[in-house]
Image (cartoon, grey):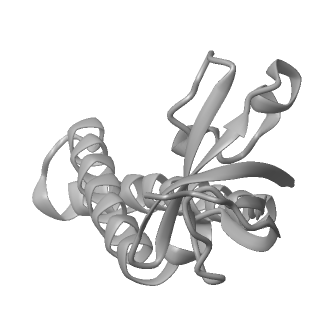
Amino acid sequence: MKDRGLVIKTSSDFAEVEVQCLVESCQKCSARSLCSGLNQSKGLLKVKNPLKASPGDRVEVEIPEKDYNKALIFIFSTFLLAVLLGISVGHFSSLVLSVSSQEAGLVGIILAVLLAAGGLFRYFRKKNKDLLYPVIIDIIKKGDYDG
């Protein structure tokens, strides 16, 4: 999805862009969680700024919906796999440890989900953090901002 907005502030490789919140499009926007203007007429998005846009510039922003969808599928399938693996390990360990299969299964699920959450946190923090930010793809009009 592409949107247009006004650069309000810049810092290093990022910019804050004010976008118009149209109720219909905001409800379907994949960057909604990054936008600070929920339920308002204007939203403020933190975006990557590879074109070095300055405050006052009108820009076009691309929101990586395909990457968001891939990330969500990856997250949910990782947790589903962790739950199934936790149940299996818990069940088989109950046979060895002489513990009820319900208790061992519950402990297995909890440990597997915690390990999966930690792994996902590290994965997205290191590798995919930059992929999920909206990006300025064009400077439509240079602004006359005095700072």
Expressed as whole percent of the image width and height from the top left, the position of residue 58 reads: 75, 57
Looking at the image, residue 51 sits to the left or right of residue 109; the answer is right
What residue appears at the point 56 percent right and 57 percent down from the top-left corner? Answer: 145
Quarter of the image for the N terminus: give it: bottom right
Name the residue: 68% across, 59% down: 68
Up-down relation of residue 146 to residue 135 (above or below): above
The image quadrant that residue 103 belongs to is: top left
Q: Quadrant of residue 135?
A: bottom right
Residue 40 appearing in the image: yes
Res 129 visible: no
Foreground residue, 68 or 107? Answer: 68
Q: In the shown orientation, is residue 94 left or right of residue 131?
A: left
Residue 43 percent coordinates (x, y): 61, 33
Q: Which of 86 and 33 is in front in this view?
A: 33
State the residue at coordinates (49%, 55%).
79
Quarter of the picture containing the C terminus is: bottom left
Rendered image quadrant of residue 139: bottom right
Say how many tags the image has. 0
Q: From the top left corner, tell me how far across and down residue 102 is, in percent.
A: 29, 36
Left or right: 101 in relation to 18: left
Q: Note whether 51 is above or below 40 in the view shown.
A: below
* 52 in relation to 78, above or below: below
Q: Where is residue 37 in the image (x, y as percent from the top left)?
A: 56, 28
Q: In this view, does 146 lie to the left or right of 45?
A: left
Front residue of this view, candidates 128 and 59: 59
Q: In this view, does 122 lie above or below 78?
A: below
Q: What residue is drawn where x is 74% and y is 28%?
A: 21
